Image (cartoon, helix red, strand yellow):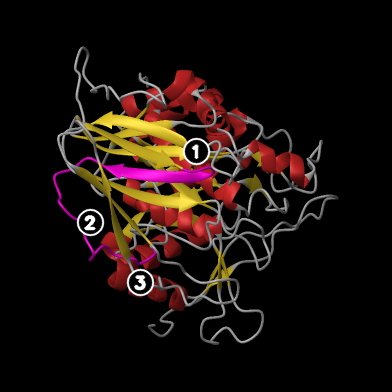
Amino acid sequence: MGAARGPDHQQDRNLVQLPSFTSSPLLTISEDLIYAMNNISSLVGVEWYFGLPFLNEQEIPTIIEDVSSILGTNLLGFQMANEPEIYESHGKKPAPYQIPEYMADWERVRSTYAADRTDLIAPNVCCPWTIDELLTAGFLTQFAPHLHSVSIQHYKDNACANALIPMPPQDAFLTYQTHSSAQKFWNPDINASQIINAAGKDFIMLETNTASCSRFAGGPGSYAGGLYLIDLAPQGASIGVSQIILHNGGVGQAYNLFTPPPNNQSTFRQWTTTPHYYSTLIMGEVMEEHGSQVMDLLLGGNSTHTPGYAIYKSGTPIKLALFNYIPDPSGANDAQFNFPSTQPSVRVKAGQTMGDQFGSDGRLRGEEQTQTVQCNAGTCTVTVKAPQFALVFLDNQDTIDPGLSTQTILATSNGRGGAQEAFNVGGTSSGSQVYASSAQKRVFVTGVLAGVVAMVVGAWAVLAR
């Protein structure tokens, strides 16, 4: 880490304490932190987004200069403003502060302190404004030359202290065990995604996780929450979302990817790795590094318990992502997915874990196991246990690459067929039809997500850019 080479940067704090809301503390950032970020990038190739203060706006030029010079090409862009629709209710901006006032304010800050930037990220709306309302008001039309990407923030459930209808944890748990939850999450953003992609901008989910404020115990931090996050990523990609960034909170938050030791943080192997961490590792493998196209296959008539996706590269299907949400370890509800293949077998890689609670040092442990499952008469059958996720590879590799990275990266439709019938994997062009015809390999994640993990390539921003 480099020594501090300049003054600390101060960001916003809430000057008014309101009931039911946490007062945002003063955030002071030393240049040491920025140098540490760049050192992380040199080790594992991380790229960064950096937030700009929207109250202490006089700090913006210095922050931009320092962060840009230190991070260099590892900097993706600057987020400017965060959840602006709650500025008024939190006492940060005078009333009225609605979409017209926000857009005028954003342009004032941009033109005064960041006039030459073309890498800004906005509008970062979460609730109750919608991205469609901002697009209708002309946000993208007016500010496109200055934007790196268009961003939103959203959670499946509101678990904050001010939630109008608190949900019992057991009820919440059940809602994370269906494919329809991932579909419903993205449905409001389909129209916006089409408009944003047509304008040549990335559409980013800049903050999400299972439930806001991480207040649900059980569901969001369980294997069900892990499966839900795996499903959320390809579902978002299927409507044109470029990236998803998962939020982490303080120690003890249910949806954190990992938890440090309770006392001495240098203690060896006392970290706790949660199901959500495994989800990000898996999705780093599901999505291609240089871009993927994803189709929800709507298996079994859009089954909410046994869904599947086809992942394409340059119009060719290369992977299948298969789910079984049913919480039944007896075997009675194991799902069989059949698909044609000219290869004699499929391969399975598993057997590694990060360790039990307070037993991880951030590295996979255990002996890597590769299993072979025989195909028959040109058909491969993948059995996905209940509950489980399987990733099937359709590329031409004969073996699973044992050298895949296990480093964690900190951010940075239509179909046919059925779960019990042969896949007819549709191409991305009208009238095209492509069949799986080469080596298949499986990766499994079971209901005991913290115990077994399969093939991994780390990514926090889990969708291909």
Which residue corresponds to mark 3?
367
Q: Is residue 183 visible?
A: yes
Name the spot of residue 304 as percent of width and height, x first.
Answer: 54, 28
Find the magenta span and give its range.
385-408
Q: Left or right? Give the position of 235 relative to 249.
A: left
Q: Of label 2 and label 1, which has the lower sequence position?
A: 1
Name the spot of residue 108 as percent of width and height, x first.
Answer: 50, 41
Main SS of the magenta part reads: loop
List the single residue furthest toward the front: 376
Q: Are marks 3 and 1 in contact (CB under 8 Å)?
A: no
Q: Amino acid at mark 3?
A: Glu
> In the image, what residue occupies the spot 65% across and 46% down?
211
Which residue corresponds to mark 2?
400
Q: Is residue 253 above or below residue 384?
A: below
SS type, badge 3: loop
Number of the label disc, if any, that sits on residue 93: none
> In the image, what residue occupies the spot 71% across and 56% down?
14
Q: Amino acid at mark 2?
A: Ile
The quadrant of the picture occupied by the C terminus is top left
In this view, the residue in front, 164 or 66, is 164
Q: Amino acid at mark 1?
A: Asp
Question: Which of the 4 quarters of the picture holds residue 85?
Answer: top right
- Binning the other alpha carbons within 10 Å of mark 1 as few (below 14), some (14 to 19) or many (20 upward) gives some
> In the image, what residue occupies the spot 47% across and 18% down?
301
